[in-house]
Image (cartoon, coloured by chain):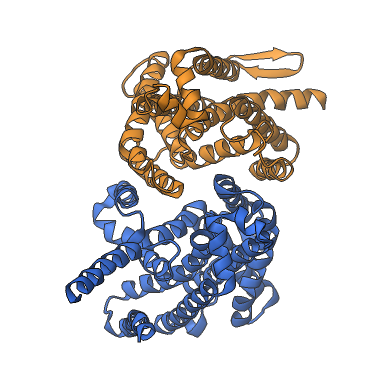
Chain colours: A orange, B blue
Amino acid sequence: MLIEILQQTINGLAIGGVYVLIALGLTTVFGILGIAHFAHGSISMFGGYLTYFLATSQGLPVLAAIPVALLAGFLLGVLVEILAYRPVRNANHINAFIVALGLTMMVEGINLQLFGHEQVVIPTGLTRVFRLGGITVPELRLYVIVAAIVLVVAMMIFVERTKTGQAIRAVAENRDAAILMGVNVRTIPLIVFGMSTALGVAAGIMVGALFAIAPGIGEGLVVKGFAVLILGGLGSFPGAILGGTVLGITESIAAGFISSAYKDVIAFVVMILVLLIRPQGLLGRAP
Amino acid sequence: MNRILALLPWLLALALLAALPQVLTVKYYLHLSILALIWVIVAQGQNLIQGFTGYVSIVQAGFMGIGAYGSTLMGLNFQWPLWATMLVAPLITALFALATGYPSLRVKGHYFAIVTLAFNLIIVIVLVNYSELTKGEAGISNIPKPWGGNREAFYYLALVLAASLTLLAALIARSRVGEILLAIRQNEDLVAALGIAAWKYKLFAFVISAMYAGLGGALYAHFQGFINPEIFGVAQSLDAILAVILGGSGTIAGPAIGAFLVVFLPEILRFADSFRLILYGLILVLATIFMPIGIVGIVKAAFARITRREARHGG
């Protein structure tokens, strides 16, 4: 029983890492721009497909394909900000949401055009399995957990320690004051979107390597990402990390012990319960 | 005089719609028109909560599913007559809406949108997995149709229902309740400060909007004769939101126009073949950027400009 729980917790950590990466992107975009970036999941899926395409039909080694896909993600994020979200910057927030829906359809459509509708698995060649006193940890899963931690830490250091990061936090805190302090509020959203999208692409690659990617999985990913934000508190970094980990582990344990068909239902019920007890999320500031 | 003038476009539209089956020669267009009328009902419901109250709910298609499955399963398992099940379907949906609305309406804005979206996902997951009852992903076929599947008769049924529910929405919007809903959209704290229990009104709007969806879903089931969980997914809930936004949020004509758009636009874009999805998305993005007030808003603004100019010339 205990071993089984430990096993599911480790499984949950890997998927939790994916959720954290998705949620970090969403929460940064939300914190800076107040946009519920619904297209985030589809772009993550696109990144996964791009990596698969580079690694298979282009013959690139996976380790070389990944940085290319991350860079493509960064540029795509910048483009999305300039072309789609900037024009609705001062309009009602629902408008940005509708733009996001339109973007989602476009990304899904473009993805179908470029990569077809086959379900694919990114070939990593990592098939070893570690055994540790009754617990089995596939090598790949371990690397995914490590990669997620590295990316999260890098993002934290960037936001907390660098000058650009400071500017990002300043804009999130008080946009007008940031402008008065000489922060360039035109470039900050570009950096935020670029980095968030690159993180999303990283999550897409992880899903593609761990499980599989197929058209339409973006919706599930982005909804889980938002669920994490609600769990942790909108706009909160530590909240996203805690929320993602909790969601991943809850889901994994629910799948192992209750029912794998209903694991998403259980995850959402947890989210709704948290919302009822703490509407601002686990680590969110009280309104 | 002014009131009669304001009614004129409505009567004209109704007359046109009533004559439509006599004019349409292509059967498929009649089929699409019926779907559009069903969507008018769904979108009018969505507008009550999204347009008037300002809470963007993403569970409208899920509620359609509850209405559709509710009506179908009651007919199948209890052998109730079709009319009875279609009448009861919105009531069942109302019960679900009460249960889900109470917790979700405690939060606002994006939180509310995401929680309702989660409810839609839960509904679909249950419909897929509770297959002893719902037959899972394969869906239920051979659902009884009224009048032996006569399309023209069904068209008039849908038209009468869409028209009367649009009228009901207009009456609600003009009542004291409607005023309070608008006030909640503009400043909920102020409403609460006036000693009005805002949550009751929000719940009312949410439940009524769900009942519209439930009836729409039941109509859909008995029109198509086939339902499966996929039809009631988040994508369709987004269509309901789009219908409201494209037509004109918080207006009465808007959702009606928007409903026809979301049904016919993908068909018109059929020429684009595999690029259809990209084009549909692009149109949405461009429409939101360049005409955020919806079609009704644009027409109203243009009309106001013309009358103002005339007034100036007259004076």
Q: Which of the 4 image quadrants contains residue A54?
A: top left
- Compared with A193, B211 (above or below) is below
In the current view of this chain or complex, which residue is farthest to the right?
Answer: A1
Q: Nearer the viewer, residue B199 or B227?
A: B199
- Compared with B186, A24 (above or below) is above
Q: Which of the 4 image quadrants contains residue A236?
A: top right
Q: Nearer the viewer, residue B274 or B136?
A: B274
Q: Which of the 4 image quadrants contains residue A108?
A: top left
Q: Which part of the image, by quadrant, shows the C terminus of chain A?
A: top right
| Apparent side of residue A261 relative to residue B299 in the rendered image (left or right) | right
Residue A230 at x, y percent in the picture: 62, 38
Q: In the image, what residue occupies the spot 40% across and 22% down?
A: A183
**Residue A204 visible from this viewpoint:** no
| Apparent side of residue A219 relative to residue B99 in the rendered image (left or right) | left
Q: In the image, what residue occupies the spot 52% across and 56% down?
A: B186
Q: Which part of the image, by quadrant, shows the N terminus of chain A?
A: top right
**Residue A152 visible from this viewpoint:** yes
Residue A11 at x, y percent in the picture: 66, 25
In the current view of this chain or complex, which residue is farthest to the left?
Answer: B313
Residue A265 at x, y percent in the picture: 66, 45
| Apparent side of residue B192 relative to residue A106 in the rendered image (left or right) | right
- Compared with B267, B27 (above or below) is below
Q: How many marks?
A: 0
Q: In the image, what residue occupies the spot 66% across and 57% down?
A: B192
| Apparent side of residue B267 relative to residue B164 in the rendered image (left or right) | left
- Compared with A185, B210 (above or below) is below
Residue B173 at x, y percent in the picture: 52, 71
